Amino acid sequence: MRDAAWMAAAGADFVKEDSCCGSQQHDVALREYAEMRDALNATGRPIFFSLCGWNSWYAERGAQLGNSWRIALDGTNWGALSGCVNRNAGLAQFAHPGAWNDPDLLQGTGIGSNDKATNPNGCFDSRQIPQSWNWYLSERQSRAQFSLWAVMSSPLLISADPSQVTPFVLETWSNEEVVAVNQELRPGGPYQGLRLTGGDLHWDPVQGRGSGVNVWGKPLPNGAWALVFVNNGPNVSDIFCDKRCYQSVADTTHRSYNVRDLWARRSVGTFYTPQTLLAKAVEPHGGVAMLRLEQRHTNDPVSRRAWTSEAFKRLPCHVAHPTGEWGGLCRPRKTRRHKAVAPRK
């Protein structure tokens, strides 16, 4: 009670309580978190309460205890973070406004951490801490993490010094269109994005090899929706998402959508349901592509201009490409109308 009162008096807006040195027994841990919840509420100050218990069983009770809860062990490298993604794939039903599954912090690449080798202001030597040797991600994997965290509506908490990270990582974290996917919610949910196709992602940080391909989707306000394509395998891959893939997040009764590449930050054409989206040549080892699709209306001048693009015209009529060559689908053929012939007398 005194700790909660002190933090509220100090002006805290966010409090994270870790399970380090705490009980790992299910009932005991939940009771102890409930005590801090009550103490924070008693202060009268609105404070975001983050539980850090490292287990997916927190999700079922999480909304009664706090505003977010860790659902897996520490995501110290892309292999561990892939495991966090796999765990979170089955927990979407527990997420809603004010209560979120937390698959851990944004790791970046290690640049900007407290490692002296990568941060001039660092405070530890990784050569003396063996467990830290595989803490790091590639830039490609850091972008995949941010894309997935955005579509999963996960807390976007940075575990690095932003003034020390690489320009690529800083550009990734500051992409306001990707952040908007994280923050925007369609009334009625689902509020956390869903894994639409693919199984578990795997990555061995020692061997530098992995497996698994996913497509994730999230419904957004006003009939919009977002897709994330991720490739953990060893080869460049084309990743498809057909109607069966996107029907749970898209309004498939709406015929056409404007498509935007969120990492290229440009609009790329028009997509028509129920045809297929293709992420072409997604890079291996954590490659990612990310789309936002907005409902297109007949008088939309942007949509009309998209048909004049030569790149757009070169695309085959059955797929739209969200990576590589961008664009939309060929205009649907008009039904031929036959002139009525008056019956002979």
Image (cartoon, helix red, strand yellow):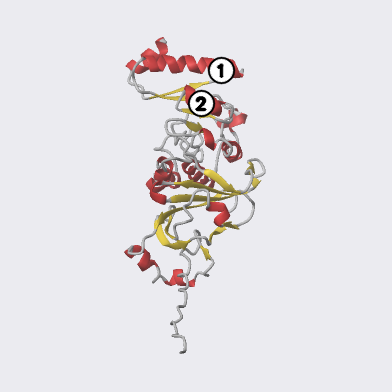
Q: Which residue is mark 2?
A: 62
Q: Which residue is mark 1?
A: 29
- Counting residues from the N terminus, which is met first, the one under dot 2 or under dot 1? 1
The spot of residue 258 in percent (x, y) is 41, 59
Report crowding for label 2: few under 14, some 14 to 19, many 20 or more residues within 10 A (C-alpha): many
Residue type at the position of mark 2: Gly
The spot of residue 340 in percent (x, y) is 44, 82
Tell which of 58 and 105 is nearer to you.
58
Q: What residue is rendered at 60% in x and 34% in y?
A: 133
Tell which of 164 and 145 is nearer to you.
145
Q: What residue is rendered at 36% in x and 64% in y?
A: 298
47 up-or-down from 188: above or below: above
Q: Is residue 103 visible?
A: no
Q: Is residue 17 visible?
A: yes
Looking at the image, residue 66 sits to the left or right of residue 207; the answer is: left
- Label 1: which secondary element: helix
Residue 55's quadrant in the figure?
A: top right
Q: How many marks?
A: 2
